[in-house]
Amino acid sequence: MRPVVIGVGNRWRGDDGVGPAVIDLLRADGRLDTTVADLAELDGEATRLVDAMAHRSLAVVVDAMRSGAAPGTVRSLVAGEVDLPTTTSLSSHGAGVAHAAGLAAALDRMPDRLVVIGVEISATADEGPLSAEVTAALPEAAARVVEEVRRHVSR
């Protein structure tokens, strides 16, 4: 199956909406041909993530993270090369990306390659826009997604 890019988050909870915002940017700017990769937006519930990435050649998940880094910091984490931190997901995402990866592995439904693009957030709110720091990080996060997909499909 072809690659999938999944933006995880809730666009109505401040910085928690970073995943969907990156998907919006990718759809709008045309840098990622949607005939090459599927784009999806999910709330982060583990079983829906497993279903979306199951048996894909590549799954790139963009999610908010809290690791203590400066807000707007973008990190790329490759499952199998590093342990996916459980802090990449907020409580509104249920169990999160790390849990979904563990579940997918147990069910033999892992993608061939799973990359998490995490964007350090400053805060979530019941409503409101992304913070200035996270908004400024959107182009870098989108560029990392495009780089991962292009590298994968050129193999």
Image (cartoon, helix red, strand yellow):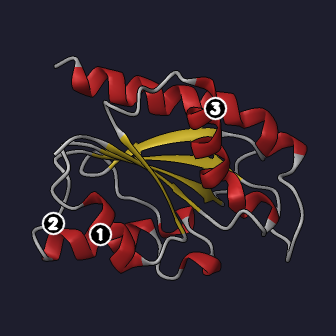
Q: Quadrant of residue 152?
A: top left
Helix, strand or loop under label 1: helix
User: Which of pointers 1 and 3 lies earlier in the amino acid sequence?
Assistant: 3
Q: Nearer the viewer, residue 103 or 3?
A: 3
Sort mark 2 into few (<14), some (14-19) or many (20+) by Cα contacts within 10 Å.
some
Left or right, residue 57 beside residue 114: left
Quadrant occupied by the C terminus: top left
Badge number at residue 50: 1
User: Which of pointers 2 and 3 lies earlier in the amino acid sequence?
Assistant: 3
Q: Which residue matches tag 2?
A: 109
Sort mark 1 into few (<14), some (14-19) or many (20+) by Cα contacts within 10 Å.
many
Q: Disc 2 versus disc 1: distance between alpha carbons?
A: 7 Å
Camera-near label (1 vs 3) is 3
Instruction: Name the amino acid, label 3.
Output: Ala
From this viewpoint, which residue is outermost toward the top?
Answer: 154
Q: Residue at x 15, y 76 (%)?
A: 106
Q: Is the residue under label 1 in contact with that under label 2 (CB below 8 Å)?
A: yes
Q: Nearer the viewer, residue 134 or 154?
A: 154
Q: x and y percent of residue 120 in the render?
A: 68, 50
Residue 117 appearing in the image: yes
Q: Disc 1 versus disc 3: distance between alpha carbons?
A: 26 Å
Q: How many marks?
A: 3
Q: x and y percent of residue 50 in the render?
A: 29, 69
Q: x and y percent of residue 15 in the render?
A: 77, 58
Q: Which residue matches tag 3?
A: 28
Instruction: Name the amino acid, label 2.
Output: Arg
Badge number at residue 134: none
Helix, strand or loop under label 2: loop
Sort mark 3 into few (<14), some (14-19) or many (20+) by Cα contacts within 10 Å.
few
Q: Quadrant of residue 70?
A: top right
